Image (cartoon, coloured by chain):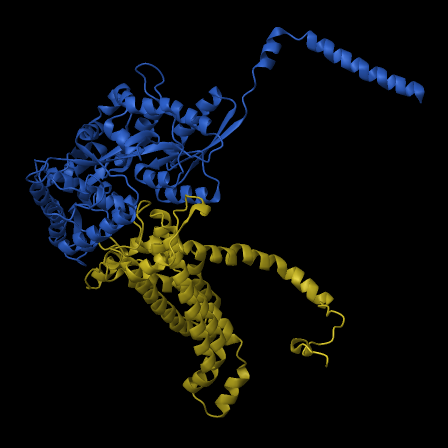
Chain colours: A blue, B yellow
Amino acid sequence: MKVFRILITLIVLGTFLLTAACAKTASPAAEEQAAVPTPEPVKLVMLTHWGEESMLKPMQALLDEYMAANPNVTIEYQSTSFDQLLTKITTAQAAGISPDIYHIYNLWVPDFVKGGMLAAPSDDVVAEIKGNYSEGSVGAVTAAGQVWGYPTEINTYQLLYNKKMFADAGITKVPETLDELKDAACKLTKKNADGTLVHTGMAVMPGWDSGVTHPFLSLLWSNNGQYLSPDLSKSLFNSPEGLAVLKLYSDLIKQGCIDPGLGGSYSDFTTGKSAMIIMANWVRAELQTSFVDGYENVGVAPIPHGPSGKSTTLQYNWLWAVDKSSKNVEEAWKLVKWLNTARGAGKASPMGEYLTTALGAIPSGLSDQKALSNTMSEYFMAAFLASTSTTMPEPILVGGQEIKTALQTNVEAAWYGQKTDEEALADAAKEADRILTENK
Amino acid sequence: MGTATNPNLTNLQPLGKPKRIRISHNALWGYIFIAPVALYLLVFSIGPILFSFWVSLHNWNMITPVADMESVGLKNFQYILGDDDVFRKALLNTFRFTILGVGTNTVLGLCGALLLNANIRFRTFWRTIFFLPIVTAPLALGMMWGTLLNKNFGLVNRILNAIGLPSQPFLSSPDQALYCIILIAVYQYVGYYIIVMTAGLQGIPEEYYDAAAVDGANWWQSFRHITLPLLRPVVLFLVVTNTIGALQVFDIVFATTTGGAETSGGGPAGATMVLVLHMYNNAFKFFKMGRASAMAMVLFAIIFIVTLVQMRLMRERA
């Protein structure tokens, strides 16, 4: 037993000495490696509404590139449809399982900020955003005096028209004024001998808040009207200018040149059921693949204006934001910054490349617009890019979505003859003012 | 000096051994078996109901922590019952949908069940046909009917035109849209009524009809005095469960009135807005979870009262 104890002691001692000796003879490189701490593994969850196959693959390629350069980072990319995005973010927030990074519509920012949901970017990120983006884009991602994320795509509205239908109807001039729009819409409406409809002059998109309010507001501003007061305390759309725009719609509906019951989607234009539509640039990808008369027959023109107005269009943005409850806020901003920073002098950022190739969208970054000028010179993109100089940003405020829905519901009530134009605008204004007061 | 007696003590029973609550072995096993379900109900039904009631008394956007909710008392109830025009419209539409939908389904279900209970050929085939829409996803049904009922390019209008009738706006008319949705709901659920009522009819002993026939009763008398009374429990079950379901209608309205991923339903011009859809919009679009919870509480109260009334009426008649 005694011999056994001595043997055990010798083995333990020997092992200790051997370990010490080996440690002494370790290479200087290994020593250096031991001094630099290995980065902790980080997992980031990212949520967007870019779920289609054509959008998923290029985004995954970018994320793979980032992960290859940062082996400690794993990115889980999640996507959902646009109509489910807000629900998914808010329910995930309530359940305490928020994604680290999300791509959001700027109208939601004030509510997210009010709820203390967003992580503010560092000063250098804010400085980069302020330096590389237009004033409108910076304003679109600012709430309560703070920039909350990198603006991504810019969307504006323009009058899209079917060149072939214009030629068939013998119309050579694209409407520039509200009166010309009215005339063209009726001339472009076509019916069979038995009275059944072939196509309408202009499409509208009932049932969809943005589809109703964004074209309405673009026409309102182009008619020298106002949406809300500059201090966002009162609605101003119930005005002679607003009434004139709503009356334009109502007259066209009464004359059968617009049919709100047609299909209710922008695909009414894509599939040739309507000759014109006021629509945003993000529809380009669908027009390229499935426009009934071929993409080359899609015309783009500024929003028609009223007698005392000039063509103005609504602009809204999307942005990358980071969730405040993320365990990896710093790493999340690092990834978002990489996505939005130019790859080198004169080069575009990964997001710039993605937005123009996968989405056909206009990137907000000025350096991206410059670096991708070849792509942006394509006639459709160029027309929308040019329109960014005459935009009014969609006001972002708490309760903004509710005001938008109130306006949509009342405009539709006028379209369907449930209310007069005057009643519809008065009711919408009353509801908007109530919401503004409630959220003051 | 006599001994003072505390009057409170006079009624006391003599202290004995404390009574032990005896639970039989079988009852204990019973409790063990129902415990998971009871726990499930507590966590996923009763808990959320109580939480929802608590939220209805607050202003909450779902984003701020629960502890920071601002208490507003009964303001949410005051608003939805007093000032919210959309809520009133949605409530009215929900009642219309429920009364017309459940009523039509009950009548058609009974007619269908009587037919299927008779000796007709290919009975199983017809049952399958009637039951098929039930197993179809409401979203798919909504899209299918949305296309069929399209004002300008839908098949139904083509058929109407072919037989010399004018086109109808259907889902694009604020006056017709809700009734179209009710018809779609009837199409989807009538098979369920038929199958359940057929099972009920087959449970009625044949001897009753034989006895009535011997007494000289005609078909109508047999139906009125034998079939209907004995089928009443089945009808009660169907009416109560489907009224509860119909008052919570959402999917079929959402699917039929949305024109794409971006649209939010309830159109045209809010003509098909129902309570749960309005609740959904308030909670997830407008960040008004307190208000949405107040609506849920009102709906809960309505369902509770309607169910009680229905059960009382059916029992009284029975």
Residue A21 % position (x, y): 73, 9
Task: Pick the residue in front: B101 or A401.
Answer: A401
Residue A61 occupies quadrant: top left
Q: How many marks?
A: 0
Identify the residue at horizontal 40%, vertical 74% (top origin). Answer: B111
In the image, taking residue A174 as reference, residue A93 lies left or right, namely: right
Eyeballing the image, is A392 above or below A29?
below
Residue sitting at the far bottom: B215
Task: Pick the residue in front: A124 or B146.
Answer: A124
Identify the residue at horizontal 66%, vertical 63% (top origin). Answer: B31
Residue A371 occupies quadrant: top left
Eyeballing the image, is B255 above or below A232?
below
Residue B235 % position (x, y): 45, 74
In the image, taking residue A382 as reference, residue B303 lies left or right, namely: right
Residue A161 % position (x, y): 17, 38
Identify the residue at horizontal 42%, vertical 48% (top origin). Answer: B69
Identify the residue at horizontal 43%, vertical 29% (top origin). Answer: A60
Residue B141 visible to the viewer = no
In the image, taking residue A18 as reference, residue A94 lies left or right, namely: left
Task: Pick the residue in front: A335 or A250.
Answer: A335
Residue A401 occupies quadrant: top left
Query: Quadrant location of the C terminus of chain A?
Result: top left
Residue A314 visible to the viewer = yes
Eyeballing the image, is A51 above or below B67?
above
